[in-house]
Image: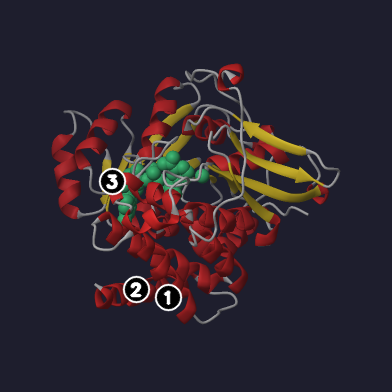
Amino acid sequence: MIDYISALPGSLSLPPFPRRLCVLGSTGSIGESTLAVAADHPGQITVTALAGARNVARLAEQAARFRPAYLAVLTEAGASELAGLLPKGYRPEILHGPEAYVALAELSEVQVVLSAIVGAAGLPPTLAAARCGKILALANKESLVLAGHLIRRACRDSGAVVLPVDSEHNALFQSLAGHCGDDVDHLVLTASGGPFRDWPPADLARASAAQALKHPNWSMGAKISIDSATLMNKGLEVIEACQLYGLSQERVKVLVHPQSIVHSLAAYRDGSLLAQMGPADMRIAIAYCLCYPARLPLKIAPLDLAALGQLTFREPRTDDFPCLGLAREAADAGPAHCVALNAANEVAVDWFLKERIGFCDIARAVSWALDRQQGLADPDFMTILELDTATRAAVTDYLTEGT
Ligand code: NAD
Ligand code: MG
């Protein structure tokens, strides 16, 4: 049984082209890919609002190119700097601070919100977009990990439509479309396995941030690249799939597929496996969400399956990469544990990137945070934010004591 997080209206009730888009996190990897799609398809997409954080110079270049009416950055100083970098005669409204991202997501002019801020910071504007009934093209998987139950409820109340940008969940979305949810036995998420998939266990403790950032197949932001190396990314994606499709974690399996061509599969009760395949390029999933249910012609070299020769699959090494199992543990324990998992991971990844802890310490910190977490059945938004803050503080103390 599949119980999708939001309603999926027929194409006639979706907004006509061009759709007015807000990109949250436009200066990041997903944000840049989104704007590459928008630049090639002005007839389908109008950029109405752009939000970055600290990379003000890049946001100014994007703004000069697309001329959105609204911009947002993290600080007041950033907002003044941005104003000074814009071309003469172009005067958008510039907002700043965490509330600015929520304000952009709620704009009445905006029809599609592409949520691509990294981490828990993406939750408030993502939830705001769901509460306002927007089309929510969702890359920020952390918001589903933290508050999937609230986003699900918001979609039901507002009629918001969620479309998954994450390549695996986008693949599942496509593999489930037009089929009866009752016929689904389980879902299979594929994982590249990350840069350390073939490393001997004894070497993992010495893995450096620079090595972890070199993903074999995808080009991505720093945090998700580290998550891919630890397999926490797949753990977060298991929870993301549970929230999107209304399943328990045992029905979301994971297979390592080093070629990253099969992006995920839906397994039906008659034994059929339906998959979506394609080049490892996020523009495919992004364009599908922006123009759903239409497909755009994209300037991406088609797959040459004969040249590829073979596609392989194997079980993940869960003993050597404990984060996947920790995420499953959190999914079973409930929403408070999912918040603790995510917060501990964000702190530990940040410390690892700054070379303050080793690779294996990430899983150690997450495990510690889960062990001390008490269960909560249905935490509201404020409780989730408080829990997130408290876990970050506790994990920071824990890591400080250990170094
Ligand atoms: P990134 O680090 O490249 O970009 C992050 C963006 O968020 C930047 O624009 C940054 O300015 C902004 N940002 C950072 N902190 C912020 C804050 N506190 N407030 C507001 N904005 C802030 O990250 P990315 O790789 O583009 O990933 C973005 C999200 O998409 C993540 O949740 C990630 O898990 C998800 N995702 C990414 C990929 C990928 O291929 N990169 C694939 C699937 C899902
Ligand atoms: Mg993914």
Q: Is residue 43 left or right of residue 3?
A: left
Q: Considering the image in quadrants, where does the N terminus appear? A: bottom right
From this viewpoint, which residue is outermost toward the right? Answer: 270
For the residues labelled 2 and 1, say whether their Cβ atoms are less than 8 Å apart. Answer: yes
Q: In this rendering, is residue 379 above or below 346?
A: below
What residue is drawn where x is 43% and y is 74%? 369
Q: Is residue 8 left or right of residue 93?
A: right
Q: In this rendering, is residue 378 above or below 263?
A: below
What residue is drawn where x is 45% and y is 45%? 194
| Separation of marks 2 and 1 at Cα, in angstroms | 8 Å
What residue is drawn where x is 26% and y is 78%? 401
Q: Residues within 10 Å of mark 1 (few under 14, many from 20)?
A: some
Q: Residues within 10 Å of mark 2 (few under 14, many from 20)?
A: many
Give the labeled residue for mark 1. Answer: 368
Circle 2: residue type: Val
Give the labeled residue for mark 2. Answer: 395
